[in-house]
Image (cartoon, helix red, strand yellow):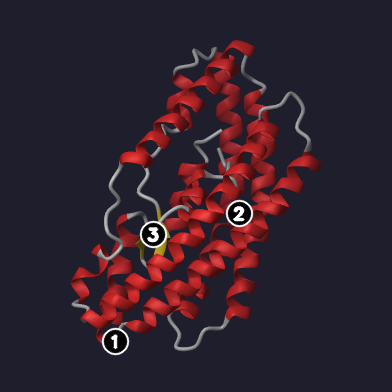
Amino acid sequence: MKSKLIFSKAIIAIAATAAVTAFAIQAHERPEPPMRAVFKKLDLTDQQKLDVRTIMQQSKADGEIYKQDLNNIKNQLKSLIRSTDWDQDSVVSLLQQEQDIKSQLALSSATKRNAVWNTLTEEQQQKLSAMSEKGKERKGKGHKGEKRSSPMKMFKRLDLTDEQSAKIKALFESQKAAMESQRETVKGYRDQAQQLVRSETFDQSAWLAVSEKLQAAHLQMSTDMSKVRHQIWNILDEEQQAKMAKMDEKREHRKGGDKHDKKRRHQDDEL
């Protein structure tokens, strides 16, 4: 479904890591099974399948309304990040616009996710909750023992000088500490949101209160990440910037052209 646009684990992943793609800090987490795959294990009746499908299709339609607006914001942000001077006011303004759009979508999707939850029987709800907990445990164990790829890996093709490498590594290290600190805060808000979605009656006021706090945290994270991306961009020389821009375009093309939209489609599969 169009869910967890704000409360998604993908956003938590961004807050947790020092790895990057196109200058964005991301986590190398194993994706959780799509919600469609999870539903197959719940033995839904034909009517339940129809109800869930209808709700999810409506959520997808809601997201399409704002797709172009989000793409425009993404492109404007890219221009600001690739500029010589850091314009924090303009960056924050664009990120706030993005947050406002996602907030509208998130409220709509939370309502629909609650509707999906309440199409399930009590036994199915318990089974889904148990599956979710097991997924969290597996992910937690994976984090403790897993090896993360170096955030410098993506820069190998750019022939960085020793000085450039040292500066970029220092930025990653400084950002990592801040992200780890924010991760737990965001996780707590996400858990609260999930509890509200998995209730018999959706409490919109309570959900909006949690959403407001999480939006503020996410805005700060996004601003910090954008500044790091800007700093990295300006460490590169013109030739390296041109190479990086082409690499970024190829990466987006391979992923379907719109990384944010693809990420949202993965988030929509979570309940």
Q: Nearer the viewer, mark 3 or mark 1?
A: 3
Q: Residues within 10 Å of mark 3 (few under 14, many from 20)?
A: many
Does 24 sit above or below residue 246? above
Q: Where the N terminus falls, by quadrant?
A: top right
In percent of the image, x 75 and y 47: which residue is there? Answer: 208
Of marks 3 and 2, the one in the foreground = 3
Position above or below: 144 against 223: above
Residue bearing mark 3:
18
Neighbourhood count class around disc 2 (C-alpha, 10 Å): few under 14, some 14–19, many 20 upward? few
Which residue was labeled with disc 2?
65
**SS under mark 1:** loop
For the residues labelled 3 and 2, the Cα–Cα distance comes to 33 Å
Q: Are marks 3 and 2 in contact (CB under 8 Å)?
A: no
Vertically, is 195 above or below 45?
below
| Mark 1 to mark 2 CA distance (whole Å) | 39 Å
User: Which SS class for mark 3?
Assistant: loop
**Left or right: where does residue 231 sit relative to residue 222?**
left
Is residue 5 in view from this perspective? Answer: no
Which residue is painted at 68% across and 43% down in the image? 108
Q: Which residue is mark 1?
A: 237
Three-letter residue code for mark 3: Ala
The earlier-in-sequence mark between 3 and 1 is 3
Q: Position of residue 45 (x, y in %)?
A: 54, 12
Is 250 left or right of 4, judged from the image as shown?
A: left
Earlier sequence position, callout 3 versus callout 2: 3
The residue positioned 70% from the left and 53% from the top of the image is: 213
Amino acid type shown at disc 2: Ile
